[in-house]
Image: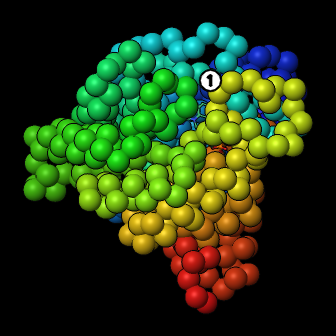
Amino acid sequence: MISYKTARPFLTMFSPETAHRLAIIGLKLGLAGRNRTPDDPILATRVVGLDFPNPVGVAAGFDKGAEVPDAMLALGFGFTEAGTVTPKPQPGNPKPRLFRLEEDEGVINRLGFNSGGLEPYLARVKARKARGAKKGIFGANVGKNRDTQDGAADYAIGIAAVANYADYLVCNISSPNTPGLRSLQGREQLKDLLTRVLAARAKAIAPHGTEGGAKVPPLFAKVGPDLDLLAIEDIAQVALETKVDGLIIGNTTIDRPTGLKSPEAPEAGGLSGKPLTEKARWCIGEMYKAVGGLIPIVGCGGIMNGTDAYRAIRAGASLVQLYSALVFHGPELVVAIKRDLAAHLRADGFKHVADAVGADHKKQ
Ligand SMILES: Cc1cc2nc3c(=O)[nH]c(=O)nc-3n(C[C@H](O)[C@H](O)[C@H](O)COP(=O)(O)O)c2cc1C
């Protein structure tokens, strides 16, 4: 097993995209090892009908092609999300398109849904299911091809294809790197998209006999964080009307907060990591209030340590996810995040993670 501390100086010799590829290969080869310590029971939580051993997951984009879900779960994550996968293969934007903001602990990407397409993705997730990989919760995140005009149709294709092979499903409608994609977050477009996608899910599951007990994987819409209060209110209304199971908040931001120090800060694309922490938390809190706590939220954006995870949960997240923190601290970070999160929960007198969800908005 190789620690990230040892591997990082080697990985940073390469371009960020090559370093990422090498990390995936290392994970495939089992070089990252496993964490066998059982999770602290205070971290166990049931959300959207699924039992999570802990609330800390891997965000989409790290494992776009579903190549290493079990390696990530073995490191101690409570769940992992693979994608975004588009129906047809597409190359994404020209390189370079991924930048490490070392001084800011941030990342800028304008990958633009580089994807091998559904075919190889499905082959991997089907093989995983056939192997009986039961350990851990696996989410499938789908998107649209750049040139597709009827975006909702692509999401319906993706969801129908993966519905029987994932524990939960995600429509990513918040990437800033596919032109027009984020307009799908608008009230009418979102309603149309979710209605069609929920129908596609029902149809895909039905042949296996939902009434006979086949599980319907919960569906999340991944939105934000570049939303104002009106947009948040619209999304909340549509989420409640369509009965989507949950929301992931959020994606990268097109904002560039003042004070960024890295020379790469002016690069175009979506910014993630530490500079996103507060904005993402604000969005989580406002969405939690807008849905009245009735729709579970996965908090994502700038979660760099256990305190960030705890604060996102207090703001309204039932689960959290991270990506950029992996770039700076390696996957071992999950162990420290879980330890510190459990310590925060105990220090504030919570018996379970679920008790802390939205605590900032409740009278103590
Ligand atoms: C290099 C990179 C690629 C990403 N690709 C995707 C993607 O394909 N689908 C998606 O839903 N989110 C994608 N994201 C967004 C992350 O899932 C996450 O929402 C965002 O980075 C904020 O979390 P973080 O600050 O912990 O990185 C990507 C992020 C990065 C940095």
Q: Quadrant of the N terminus?
A: top right
Residue 354 seen in this snapshot: yes
Q: Which residue is mark 1?
A: 110
Residue at 54% across / 49% down in the picture? 227
* Residue closest to the eye, 180 or 351: 180
Instruction: Return the x and y of residue 171 as percentages of the image width and height.
Output: 39, 39
Dividing the image into four quarters, tell me where ligand 1 lies.
top right
Q: Quadrant of the C terminus?
A: bottom right
Q: Is residue 352 left or right of residue 14?
A: left
Instruction: Return the x and y of residue 125 as percentages of the image width and height.
Output: 38, 31
Quarter-wise, where is residue 31 in the image?
Answer: top right
Amino acid under label 1?
Arg
* Residue closest to the eye, 362 or 12: 362
Instruction: Return the x and y of residue 4 as percentages of the image width and height.
Output: 79, 36
Quarter-wise, where is residue 183 in the image?
Answer: top left
Q: Is residue 323 above or below residue 26?
A: below
* Residue closest to the eye, 30 or 336: 336
Q: Is residue 334 above or below residue 251?
A: below
Q: Residues within 10 Å of mark 1 (few under 14, many from 20)?
A: many
Residue sitting farthest toward the front: 230
Residue at 12% across / 44% down in the picture? 206
Residue at 55% across / 26% down in the picture? 177
Residue 7 seen in this snapshot: no
Residue at 57% across / 14% down in the picture? 93
